[in-house]
Image (tube, rainbow, N blue to C red):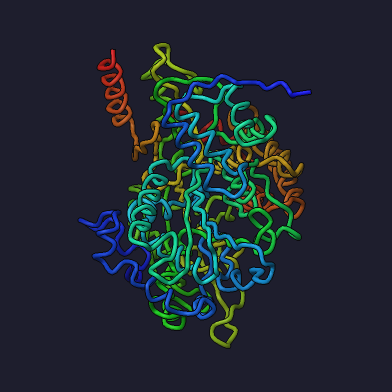
Amino acid sequence: MPAPTQHRLIFQHIDEPGYSNDIDCYLRNGGYEVLKKAVAQKPEDLREEVKKSGLRGRGGAGFPCGFKWSLVDRKSGKPIYLIVNADESEPGTFKDRYIMHQDPHQLIEGTMISCFANDVKQAYIYIRGEMPEGARILEKAIAEARAQNLVGPNILGTGYSCEIFVHRGAGAYICGEETGLIESLEGKRANPRIKPPYFPAVLGLYQCPTIVNNVETLCHVKHIVQQGGAEYAKIGTPGNTGTRIFCVSGHVQRPGYYEFPAGTITMGQLLNDVCGGPLPGRTFKAVIPGGSSAKVLRFGERYKGKRKVGTDMVDYDWGVEDVPMDFDSLAMIGSMGGSGGVIVMDDSVNMVEALANINAFYQHESCGQCTPCREGSLWMKKISSRMVHGEARKEDAALLKSVADQIPGRTICAFGEACSWPTQSFLIKFKDEFEGYAEAKKNLPADRLSLV
Amino acid sequence: MSTPTISPSVNLKPETLARIDEVITHYPVKRSATLPLLHLIQEDAGYISEDAVLWIAQKLELQPINVLEVVTFYPMFRRAPIGRRHIKVCRTLSCALLGGYKTCENFQKEFNTTLGATSPDGEVTVDFVECLASCGTAPVVLIDEILHEKVDAAKVKQISAQIRAEAAARK
């Protein structure tokens, strides 16, 4: 079956010739009309539309956005904050960068609508420190919107006021975790907070109710309010509504970003039809479907079980290529859709070396407050690097797996899971390669690319 | 008895000081301005000195350790000067799969330096950094504030020549 055609909702204007990131261009393309419409409605009605839309957060967890908003403590009498999570750092993910660089006003409009819907008076955009250009573009865009009375005091004469400030991170991946991000915004080390009691919706920034949403999620809100929640929910599939942006990197002919109605495209269609298949003379070996912490899939393996289609339970028997790229199907086969970052590895890659690369990342990024994660990520890195650069032993495979198995569920935040899933899944799916690495290493081409 | 006041010596440009005073107003709690102040001072002075830590602590009414622990947590803040240009090569998987390690090695050769060190002429520091969120155009390199995409061997040569030309023009 050929791949469906792209449906560019969020990325409608990305890479469009002549489209610039200033407010005049945005206004010429119908910009801020939805905000004007929104501020004439009741905030609770807007929240209801988002609930009806079925929108799931695009930062990685896929948590229903309308439900997240419904958890906000609106009776505390404290101010409610909204933080835009623009700390895009999950390896393999690169969609938010393009939104902020090329279409910043779409984000600002979505943010202002979300602020109005939740009675937020102050929003912060927490952007990665490594995106100084993005921070400048956003600051300029906010200033432009303020000059047009779309941000700031008494927006469009409605009496509603809301300010947005850009706040830059400084190179720490853990700031993408929402409570770590809040700590960082408070001027501290980004050590995630323990939940309960520190659910951001109740005890977030400055111990006030706080909403943290991903850049892309807030852009979807604009389109939901524009079309109505019910209409938006017709895009995609039930439970996976709207569009989904896939960021494909690694060993394919045409890496890049592609937007499709959620749940309508399979891994095979995405990698072969859309991205042009493997590089010449190569075959696909493995793919990580949702950012580097998602569990790896091995080409050639099969997934069998029963799944719900409408009201019926039907059998499925999929190869990697057959898996629909939605949150639920990827979870069903033991991985996750995560942030939409698809990393492809072909048969030139040795999986021990690829894992050593990933382990070095997680060791570098552990915040260090929980012992299992701090020490576990360090040992996984040390063992896998030693296998590559020093002596590899057959028993290293079991050792790595045992370290990884002792981390998840024993940490304050989900980083514990994120850092152990790669090792666990690589060891299950490519056990032979880890156990045989000491021997195989002798015959690997000396001029192969270093991965660690 | 009055507490002796320390006056840490930081020499900041007037526009940096103005931006510092402005950015503090963005937050209901002064401590939130710690990261913005560190960025502004590092952009102005090149690194975060001991005195800068004390100065920020006084400015935001914090203990110096509250600032120092932030400096040591975030990889972007440095406590010593580096070369005039900062070459940050992405080390993470998608870039590595397309030759990121080679790119990093080539930059070190071009400037006769090693990883994390500054070139003998003081011009360039080459570092590895983790994922720069541009995996579709791997390998990527952030030089100061500009992102360079698909940096293969030829592009390393081209960028290096340009850096050398700019350095020569300054002399």
Residue A451 vertical placement versus A409 (above, below): above
Residue A62 relative to residue A9: left or right: right
- Asked if one can make out residue A97 in the rendered structure from this viewpoint, the answer is yes
Point out the image quarter for the N terminus of chain A: bottom left
Residue B74 relative to residue B148: left or right: right
Please state the horizontal and vertical placement of residue A89, each as a whole percent of the image: 51, 47
Residue at position x 45%, y 31% in the image:
B16
Residue at position x 56%, y 73% in the image:
A66
Depth check: give the residue in front, A10 or B99. Answer: A10
Depth check: give the residue in front, A278 or A230. Answer: A230
Residue at position x 27%, y 64% in the image:
A27
Residue B107 vertical placement versus A427 (above, below): above
Question: Residue furthest toward the bottom?
Answer: A311
Q: Dividing the picture into quarters, in which one does residue A304 lie?
A: bottom right
Residue A408 relative to residue A260: left or right: right
Please state the horizontal and vertical placement of residue A65, each as a whole percent of the image: 55, 69
Q: Dividing the picture into quarters, in which one does residue B142 lie?
A: top left
Question: Residue furthest toward the left?
Answer: A18
- Asked if one can make out residue A449 in the rendered structure from this viewpoint, the answer is no
Depth check: give the residue in front, A395 or A118. Answer: A118
Total marks shown come to 0
Please state the horizontal and vertical placement of residue A112, each as a whole percent of the image: 45, 64
Depth check: give the residue in front, B66 or A224. Answer: B66
Residue at position x 61%, y 73% in the image:
A70
Question: Residue furthest toward the right?
Answer: B1
